[in-house]
Amino acid sequence: VPLAAVMTAPNQPVEVQQLPDPILEKGGIILETLYSEVCGTDVHLLHGWLEGVPYPIIPGHFSVGRVVETGGAVSDVNGKLIQPGAIATFLDVHETCYNCWYCLVAKASTRCPQRKVYGVTYSAKDGLPGGWSELIYLKPGVKVLTLPEEVSPKQFIAGGCALPTALHAIDRAQIQIGDVVVVQGCGPVGLSAAILALLSGAGKVIVIDKFESRLVVAKSNGVDETLAIKADDPRQHIERVLELTNGHGADVTIEATGID
């Protein structure tokens, strides 16, 4: 009987509970959890800041595990047959229909009424749909990726959900060779975005944060300039960016402070 860390309701302590073993369907997969991230989204879930969350839930939307059992022949996104013992991760978003107005017209699949997210919009009553559990049940149709041998589970989880979030931002930003890129916020997302901006050909990457320790890490990863926000002079970093860019400012600005 697997143990799971369950959020029973907003602003309540997380409880460790024993939950039933999953019932394996054809096309389903049971994973033994190796690592599961604690994300900023989980903080929001704990405080009840997201709408439509079906508490109680098992958080953990970014995870990696070892395949225990599959419901028949199941392949990963590359068409590779998934074998017991394989190390795998999965796309937490599931059941998006790609047929509704949001998916087809608005091009906003995140608004799809059928869309579900592991660790966020599945209830603990639905089985084991979150990484804060000894076992994770992947429903039939979940997109699975087996890790290559050269990538360890520990290396993979280090990127967390911050790395793909930053990758999406860089993709949307369409950085051109030589661009000046300013990244506001140097947490996991901001740091990942700054490194990816450098790899994308940015001519200068400037990172802004209020924590000097984070800026030191950014500098050690090759960022050109770091600016610390001063509470008594909130415009200082704006003036410094203009100074560093001959008055032109940034070609691309990436907001990664996590503040609405």
Image: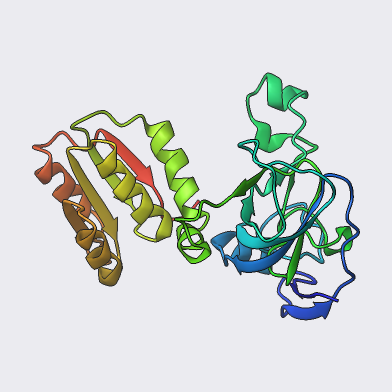
Where residue 195 sits: x, y (%)? Answer: 30, 49
Residue at (82, 66) in percent of width and height: 56
Q: Residue at the spot x=15%, y=33% of the render? A: 248
Position of 194 with respect to 147 (left or right) is left
Q: Taking 128 as reference, is 155 left or right?
A: left
Labels in figure, total = 0
Position of 93 with respect to 240 (left or right) is right
Placement of the N terminus among the 4 image quadrants: bottom right
Q: Locate residue 138, reporting x and y percent.
A: 77, 53
User: Is residue 47 at all visible to an observer of this figure?
Assistant: no
Q: What's the coloring here?
A: rainbow
Asked whether 114 or 243 is in front, the reply is 114
Q: Can residue 31 be spotted in the picture?
A: yes
Q: Which x, y percent locates residue 167?
A: 43, 42
In the rendered view, tell whether residue 89 sits above or below residue 108: below
Residue 221: image x %, image y %? Answer: 24, 58
Classify residue 133 by image quadrant: bottom right
Q: Nearer the viewer, residue 36 or 226?
A: 36
The residue nearer to you, when weighing 139 against 32, is 32
Q: Residue at x 26, y 60 (%)?
A: 218
Q: Is residue 256 left or right of residue 250?
A: right
Compared with residue 145, is residue 97 higher up or lower down, i.e. above or below? above
Q: Residue drawn at (71%, 41%), measured in percent from left and top?
A: 75
